[in-house]
Amino acid sequence: MTGSLVGSTGRVTGKTGAGLVGEVLVHVRERQGTEAFLAYLAVPGDPLPVGSQVVVVEYQPPRTVYVAPLLG
């Protein structure tokens, strides 16, 4: 799963923001399911509340992702 999460979409399940380690559920194509990851903001900005849609911009094994809001 090295790097394969980049570009995947998910949903915030634990508030993510500056100084906060949040949680997101991300669809993992390789495993055909959804998994929880620790999440950090990829770019400093406003916190992402629970329920926000995000895209993974960086993956650090085993369970950490950096996310940005999904626009559109």
Image (cartoon, rainbow, N blue to C red):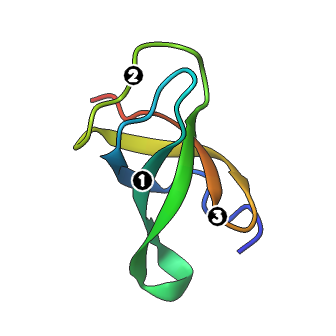
Q: Amino acid at mark 1?
A: Val
Residue 35: which quarter of the image? bottom left
Percent from the top left, x then y, of residue 31?
A: 51, 86
Q: Which is nearer the N-term, disc 2 or disc 3?
A: 2
Q: Which mark is residue 24?
A: 1
Q: Amino acid at mark 3?
A: Arg
Vertical relation: 36 (above or below) 41: below
Q: What's the residue at 39%, 22% (across, down)?
A: 47
Q: Amino acid at mark 2?
A: Pro
Left or right side of 48 for 30: right
| Closer to us: 67 or 19 | 19
Is label 3 in a helix, a strand or a loop?
Answer: loop
Left or right side of 51 for 64: right
Vertical relation: 17 (above or below) 38: above
- The residues tagged by marks 3 and 1 sit, at their Cα atoms, a distance apart of 10 Å
| Closer to us: 57 or 17 | 17
Residue 58: which quarter of the image? top right
Vertical relation: 43 (above or below) 39: above
Q: What's the residue at 44%, 51% (across, down)?
A: 23
For label 3, the residue is 63
Percent from the top left, x then y, of residue 63?
A: 64, 64
- The residues tagged by marks 2 and 3 sit, at their Cα atoms, a distance apart of 20 Å
Number of numbered tags placed on the structure image? 3
Percent from the top left, x then y, of residue 44?
A: 58, 15
For label 2, the residue is 47
Residue 32: which quarter of the image? bottom left
Q: What's the residue at 73%, 61% (across, down)?
A: 3
Q: Dot 3 surroundings within 10 Å: few (below 14), some, or many (20 or more)?
A: few
Q: Dot 2 surroundings within 10 Å: few (below 14), some, or many (20 or more)?
A: some
